[in-house]
Image (cartoon, rainbow, N blue to C red):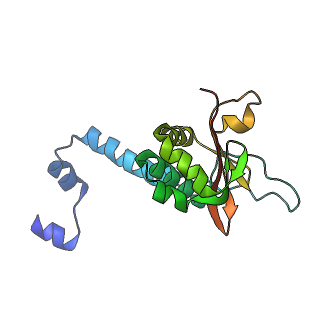
Amino acid sequence: MDETLDKKGLGAAEVIRLLHLTPPMFAVSLAAALCLGACGKQEEKPAAAPAGQAAAPSAELTPDQQQVIYWVGRAADRGNLVALHRYMAEPFGWNGAQVPTEEALQQLRAHDEYTDRLKALLDRGCLSTGSQLLCPPDSATDPKYAGDRATFAQQGGAWKLTAMTLGHK
């Protein structure tokens, strides 16, 4: 067998024997491996909206959008307001009013449950309009939505958390 390894690699019979697989289990394993390779292919993305037209809201997020949502959610989950501050816009929309970001952070410091609520609403997902991320998607699609919401937009070339509104509990 060492000679087989040196010259040709393992054959199907050696793999089956080494892994203690029955031939039907080997076939299932092989089919799964082939499917993973083929199933992982990305579909082509639709072209961007023509200039002057707003893009339709989409659940598909760019990697930059996914990343900012992840880091804001992680900071909120850990109660890490220093990290959260890095991803907040200046000024910040707090419950419908534009305030200095530090003022919004003071509210978050005073009420631990606010960061929990931010994390929970981000866990529900966000909807992209192209220029904004609206979280959760219900906040953009349901006119009767009265829960917590957050908004992200680009500021200085990076996605930032621009607003948080606490809904009715």
How many marks do you count on the picture? 0
The quadrant of the picture occupied by the N terminus is: bottom left
Q: Nearer the viewer, residue 102 or 32?
A: 102
Q: Nearer the viewer, residue 16 or 86?
A: 86
Rendering coords of residue 31 (x, y %): 39, 46
Residue at x 55%, y 43% (from the top left corner):
122
Q: Nearer the viewer, residue 24 or 66?
A: 66
The quadrant of the picture occupied by the C terminus is: top right
Rendering coords of residue 121 (x, y %): 56, 38
Furthest residue to the bottom? Answer: 7
Residue at x 73%, y 55% (from the top left corner):
130
33 lies left or right of 52: left
Q: Is residue 9 above or below residue 49?
A: below
Determine if residue 42 is in view: no
Rendering coords of residue 146 (x, y %): 69, 29
Q: Is residue 42 above or below residue 137?
A: below
Residue at x 43%, y 53% (from the top left corner):
80
Q: Nearer the viewer, residue 116 or 112?
A: 112
Rendering coords of residue 88 (x, y %): 59, 57
165 lies left or right of 109: right
- In which quarter of the view is residue 43 placed? bottom right
51 lies left or right of 106: right
Determine if residue 100 is in view: yes
Furthest residue to the right? Answer: 52
Residue at x 54%, y 42% (from the top left corner):
118
Q: Is residue 8 above or below residue 78?
A: below
